Image: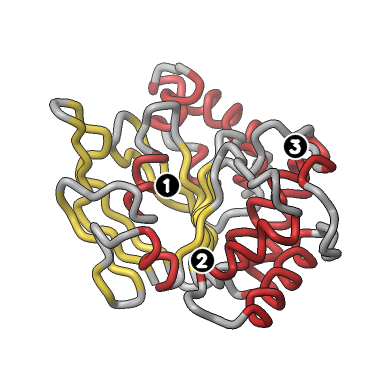
Amino acid sequence: MLVVNGLVKRFGGFTAVNNVSFKVDQGEILGLIGPNGSGKSTIFNMLSGTLVPTAGSIEFDGRQIAGTAPHAIINSGIGRTFQIPRPFRRLTIFENVELAGFYGQGRHSRAKADASAEKALAMVGLPTNRHATVDTLGAAGLKKLELAKALATGPKLLLADESLGGLDEHEMDQAADMLRKIRDELGITIIWVEHIMGVLMRVVDRVMVLDHGEKISEGLPSAVASDPRVIEVYLGTDADSTQAAAAEARRRAGIQPHA
């Protein structure tokens, strides 16, 4: 579904993303992890059209989209959430999601926008009545609203940006289950950026790890959790101590020893 080749983004003399290539298959959940400043958000911003790549190509559904305007990318089938929810607080919950439906799916009728909003709200477990206000939502509710807005745009590919931030342990598990449900029931492919490595590793099919703008590891969660370079980045461990550090990485990732 998505083929990224040689992606580069420079800001003046600073290279935020350096020659990153990867693919995402239809129906897959790819986890994208790395320390702060590793280039995760920059990649999301290039995939969603907020930033224009300095070099490289992005092919989505057989079409080159690098440098395409955000509204055109959303219309082509890529939706995204944001790490920090910023709803329109003068609008109701329903109106926030309805507006996303209008924006994402083009000049559709109001009836179609309403239907997409109702479906998205029901999927994430938020009220579908027309009068519930945003002020009634806590941190978990606002994250659900972000997901509902993205779903209302009718995506084939969802870019989920730190869906667990600010949530307690129970809410994290619910949010992770929600992403898996979106993939399983709606058939939406997902790239998930997350700092909470343990929860992410239990849900994703593959993991890609960035450090200082470069891809340092990619593969199955169990393999990535045992990668000496990943262990060093996350645990500050000398690569020679691989065996003990790998066990610690797997423990943090919630991966059983036999995995």
Image location of residue 40, percent across then percent down: 40, 40
Left or right? Give the position of 205 relative to 203: left
Contact flag, marks 3 and 1 (Cβ < 8 Å): no
Answer few, some or many: residues within 10 Å of disc 1's Cα (few below 14, many 20 plus, some between 14 and 19): many
Amino acid carrying label 1: it is Met
Per the image, the residue denoted by label 2 is 103
Left or right? Give the position of 145 relative to 201: right
Helix, strand or loop under label 2? helix
Left or right? Give the position of 131 relative to 191: right
Colouring: secondary structure
Give me the residue at 18% from left, 54% from top.
56
Closer to the chain start, of discs 1 and 2, is 2
Contact flag, marks 1 and 2 (Cβ < 8 Å): no
Per the image, the residue denoted by label 1 is 208
The residue mark sitting in front, 1 or 2, is: 2
Work out whether residue 203 or residue 177 is closer to the camera in this orientation and state it.
Answer: 177
Contact flag, marks 2 and 3 (Cβ < 8 Å): no
Amino acid carrying label 3: it is Ala
Per the image, the residue denoted by label 3 is 139
